[in-house]
Image (cartoon, coloured by chain):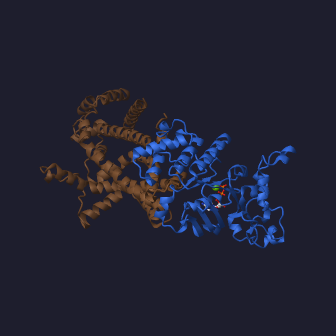
């Protein structure tokens, strides 16, 4: 199948107080129509920045340089004039965010905010847009959708607001939907509902979803393909089963070990389920990373050896679909 | 219900203001009867006693207050010692020009200050942004009477394109309504600008700060993610939120604006309440002073209520709460 989205060697640098820092380093991946592409990694690994770069939503004042190519079908999004790109944004490429509580404008009604997108990208009369908004709210499972149109965000719960965000994002039947930790702020039962909804939508509209999360367990259930990010870099990437069953990068391995349910042995031994914080140490600060010669995970890696601190590991291709960036694979 | 409660507490507030002003004026040095007699030219003991009786000055202070309060309820604000006219009709003549002046100043400062602040917020470290900060500083630090006097000097002698005194040109008394309105507007320009300068500075600074904060919020990112143009993002999604604290500020500052108007009216000889109270203070004309104070406190309270209601209309979050 033809690629829907193809990201080639995306590199993003920021101007910061500590000088120029590399936030994204050589990011490459492709997305096929209807595919769910999972992105995992700890806080600060650059997941959101990858998404924001795709949406071209990063504050221009921050950007020192952005290089590489982002092809949507045949157009390079990074070269598209702002005005042309706006026709795609919110229309064919849409995004839902991590913060449902604050992502809706408090002074406009739900109906207004949904129809605004519809009227912007589609040739509809206000009346038709209203009807479509009601359909959308019903589609995302909001009870009493007609009444909800007149509600304001503060009258809805977090889960309901995230449903509204999803309704807004899918209103123009996007080809690509970026979901950046869409459930982090919600409680567990609601989380499961939102993921179910996303799966339904993906099947119904054949929308490709980039699903960002720090929870490997979620990706184990939903993703077709998984990329693991660390310190602005994709350190391992492959089909879901490859990543889950034969992870090659030590960082991926420790992430997998953190999936509570999969870790049967730990449970049998009566140990509490592990979580991410059990990987000792923290991600080095960006400013430090820029001066680092070797592998950015070296400081925390259980399998570290000499080469790791002197040479940055390239991406090794393990087979047709899996790559990993670790010196261990050279041998 | 809600509105009724507000009106009621507003009324209580006004009664409090009257009582307070009343007692403060009692504390002022000097004898009222003597001041009145002085303005008439002579002061025999008999005359003083007569004056005291006519104006009720011989009664105990507290009963003077209650008599006064009773009169106020029937819109009788007493008779001016100085003008020998009912205070209410004095106020009726003067309130129009003051309201015109104050509203024009608010209008000018909002219409110029807010867009200026918004544009500055779009580039927080740009040249315009620094200019707004500087303007705010200068505008805030410049006393109204000084900038007023500078205008007077400049437009009276250097380029006399605007009149610097009064409300209208008496020679146009017989002209059509349209011509007279234009003439009043022409007279209004300098006083209104003078009064607007301070508030323009404050509103632009406030708008800048409020807008910078708003533009960094998540829903602005959502608006951009929808594909809206930057103009729509800033002026529809941003400004609608950023304007909320400005509405409050405008309401809270109405009182300051009125006191600023006293100075401006004095400098430009604008026949409003400010000019009236200024003359009344010089003449120790207590009924007039009290009357103007009451009317201004009513105006301040009404302005606060209006801005409160404006805020409620603009922000759905507090619409349904007490
Ligand atoms: N406004 C900013 N200014 C400077 N650096 C920033 C800014 N926003 C993000 N960064 C840096 O970019 C890097 C990547 O951040 P990003 O938000 O993409 O992380 P993330 O993987 O999404 O983490 P999380 O799981 O917490 O959402 C971080 O190291 C962060 O410090
Ligand atoms: Mg993030």
Single out the residue that lies furthest toward the left: B174
Residue B233 locus on image (x, y percent): 46, 55
Q: In the image, A213: left or right of B231? A: right
| Residue shown at 23% from the left, 58% from the top | B163
Q: Which chain has been coloured blue in this picture?
A: A
User: B34 above or below B141?
Assistant: above
Quarter of the rendered image showing ligand 2:
bottom right
| Residue shown at 57% from the left, 66% from the top | A71
| Residue shown at 47% from the left, 63% from the top | A84
Residue toward you, A83 or B36? A83
Q: Quadrant of residue A255?
A: bottom right
Residue toward you, B196 or B293? B196
Q: Is residue A276 visible?
A: yes
Residue B16 locus on image (x, y percent): 41, 33
Q: Is residue B282 visible?
A: no
User: B211 above or below B16?
Assistant: below
| Residue shown at 23% from the left, 33% from the top | B47
Single out the residue that lies furthest toward the right: A269
Residue toward you, A193 or B115? A193
Residue A182 locus on image (x, y percent): 62, 49
Q: Which chain has been coloured brown in this picture?
A: B
Residue A319 locus on image (x, y percent): 75, 65
Residue toward you, B32 or A122? A122
Q: In the image, A178: left or right of A133? A: right
């Amino acid at each position: 199948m033809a690629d829907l989205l193809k990201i080639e060697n995306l590199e993003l640098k920021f101007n910061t107080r500590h000088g120029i820092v590399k936030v994204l380093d050589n990011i490459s991946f492709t997305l096929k129509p209807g595919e769910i592409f999972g992105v995992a990694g700890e806080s600060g690994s650059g997941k959101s920045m990858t998404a924001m770069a795709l949406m071209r939503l990063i504050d221009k004042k921050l950007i020192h340089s952005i290089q590489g190519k982002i092809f949507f079908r045949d157009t390079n999004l990074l070269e598209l004039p702002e005005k042309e790109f706006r026709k795609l944004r919110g229309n064919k490429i849409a995004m839902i965010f991590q913060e449902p509580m604050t992502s809706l404008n408090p002074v406009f009604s739900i109906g207004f905010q949904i129809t605004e997108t519809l009227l912007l990208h589609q040739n509809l009369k206000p009346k038709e847009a209203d009807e479509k908004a009601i359909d959308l709210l019903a589609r995302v499972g909001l009870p009493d959708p007609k009444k909800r149109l007149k509600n304001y965000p503060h009258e809805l719960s977090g889960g309901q607001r995230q449903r509204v965000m999803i309704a807004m994002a899918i209103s123009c039947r996007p080809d690509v939907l970026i979901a950046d930790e869409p459930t982090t702020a919600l409680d567990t039962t609601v989380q499961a509902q939102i993921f179910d909804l996303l799966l339904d939508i993906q099947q119904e509209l054949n929308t490709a979803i980039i699903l960002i999360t720090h929870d490997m367990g979620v990706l184990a259930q939903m993703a077709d393909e998984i990329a693991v990010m660390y310190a602005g870099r994709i350190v391992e990437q492959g089909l879901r089963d490859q990543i889950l069953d034969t992870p090659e990068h030590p960082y991926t391995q420790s992430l997998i070990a953190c999936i509570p349910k999969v870790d049967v042995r730990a449970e049998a031994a009566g140990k509490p389920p592990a979580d991410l914080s059990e990987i000792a140490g923290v991600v080095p600060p960006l400013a430090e990373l820029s001066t680092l010669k070797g592998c950015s995970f070296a400081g925390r890696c259980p399998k570290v050896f000499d080469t790791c601190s002197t040479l940055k590991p390239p991406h090794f291709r393990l087979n047709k679909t899996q790559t990993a960036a670790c010196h261990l694979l050279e041998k | 219900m809600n509105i009724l409660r507000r009106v009621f507490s507003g009324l209580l507030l006004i009664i409090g203001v009257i009582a307070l002003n009343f007692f403060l004026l009692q504390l002022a040095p000097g004898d009222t009867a003597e001041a009145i007699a002085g303005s008439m030219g002579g002061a025999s003991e008999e005359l003083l006693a007569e004056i005291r009786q006519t104006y009720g000055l011989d009664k105990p202070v507290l009963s003077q207050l209650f008599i006064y309060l009773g009169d106020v309820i029937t819109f009788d604000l007493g008779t001016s010692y100085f003008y020998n006219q009912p205070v209410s009709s004095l106020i009726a003549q003067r309130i129009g020009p003051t309201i015109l002046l104050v509203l024009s100043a608010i209008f000018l400062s909002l219409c110029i200050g807010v867009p200026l602040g918004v544009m500055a917020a779009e580039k927080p470290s740009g040249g315009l942004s620094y200019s707004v900060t500087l303007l705010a500083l200068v505008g805030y630090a410049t006393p109204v009477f000084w900038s007023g006097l500078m205008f007077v000097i400049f437009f009276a002698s250097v380029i006399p394109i605007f009149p610097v005194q009064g409300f209208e040109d008496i020679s146009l008394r017989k002209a059509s309504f349209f011509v007279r309105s234009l003439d009043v507007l022409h007279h209004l320009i300098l006083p209104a600008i003078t009064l607007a300068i301070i508030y323009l500075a404050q509103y632009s600074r406030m708008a800048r700060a409020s807008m910078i904060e708003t533009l960094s919020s998540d829903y602005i990112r959502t608006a951009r993610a929808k594909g809206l143009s930057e103009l729509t993002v800033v002026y529809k999604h941003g400004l609608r939120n950023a304007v909320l604290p400005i509405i409050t500020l405008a309401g809270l500052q109405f009182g300051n604006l009125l006191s600023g108007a006293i100075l401006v009216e004095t400098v430009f000889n604008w026949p409003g309440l400010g000019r009236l109270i200024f003359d009344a203070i010089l003449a120790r004309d207590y009924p007039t002073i009290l009357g103007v104070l009451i009317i201004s406190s009513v105006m301040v309270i009404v302005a606060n209520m209006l801005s409160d209601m404006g805020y409620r209309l603009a922000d759905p979050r507090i619409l349904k709460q007490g």
